[in-house]
Image (tube, rainbow, N blue to C red):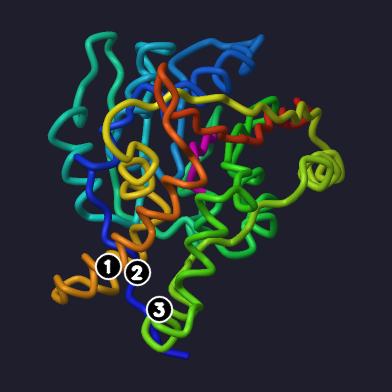
Amino acid sequence: MPVHPAPAWDPAQYLRHEGHRTRPFLDLLARVQDPADRTGPLAIADIGCGAGNVTALLAGRWPDARITGVDSSQAMLDRARTEYGGPTPGGGSMDFHEADAATWTPGETYDLIVSNAALQWVPGHLASFPRWLDGLAPGGTFAFQVPGNFTSPSHTILADLCTSPRWRGRLGGVERFHPVRDPAEYLTALLGLGCAADVWETTYLQVLHGEDPVLDWVKGTALRPVLTELDGDADAAAAFTEEYRALLREAYPPTPHGTVFPFRRLFAVARKDAA
């Protein structure tokens, strides 16, 4: 099996569907309670902060918070620092640092640790929960959301293509996803770590517009490992994309109102024991 490079991220492509990508985080944030005994600015960490657009929503909720975003993509971090880094209007700050979520350990005590659509890229992320919870203050909160659509056509078609006779020699094993756990597993794990936990799932029926909108969506996420592997070989990239495009059109036909793209998301909000 060939060794594949880490996916190269494109902030502009990712943000083309910013509204749909942001909505799950807003729904997650709505379930996060303010600390009952808050006496000063919160310390917040965002694991897998990406381009920083979601991290900025934390500053909107807690204007004086000290917020640290971590990500492994230099391109994403450059965008985040340029757009959002530094002091915030409410007297807080946003700083962004390069770190691999798989090995990141809190370097200080946080009141809130969040992660938005990132843990599916982290192998064995459930094993990191104790380490991250250790970085929370008593009564602090760990909140995350992850996609739960790995059995949807957008992903199964991609996986089948990568392992098809034409592509498996080059793309076999290129997918870097680490499928998320069932909601019950997350709940059991968080309860077992002594947290009060709320875990749920939602399927958003996203209506996308434009020509081949599902392909445009996955170009910002699921297709990144393939595009990275084929970078420098324009003919191969075009051939793979055309095959994938045709299959996505069959799986997600347009309607008079747009293309409906069901997207399942899993959510968890865990509060550490105040004692």
Image quadrant where residue 60 sits: top left
Calculate the distance from the C-alpha at mark 3 to the C-alpha at mark 1.
11 Å
Tell me the residue that label 1 is attached to.
228
| Screen quadrant of the C terminus | top right
Calculate the distance from the C-alpha at mark 2 to the C-alpha at mark 1.
8 Å
Image quadrant where residue 67 sits: top left
Residue type at numbered disc 2 = Ala
Residue type at numbered disc 3 = Leu
Q: Earlier in the sequence, mark 2 or mark 1?
A: 2
Q: Residue at x 36, y 22 (%)?
A: 19
Q: Position of residue 250 (x, y in %)?
A: 47, 47
Q: Earlier in the sequence, mark 3 or mark 1?
A: 3
Q: Secondary structure at mark 1?
A: helix
Tell me the residue that label 3 is attached to.
171
Along the line of sight, the residue nearer the viewer: 196 or 93: 196
Badges 2 and 1: C-beta atoms under 8 Å apart? yes
Q: Residues within 10 Å of mark 3 (few under 14, many from 20)?
A: many
Tell me the residue that label 2 is attached to.
6
Residue type at numbered disc 1 = Thr
Q: Position of residue 110 (x, y in %)?
A: 52, 34
Numbered range of the magenta stretch:
113-118
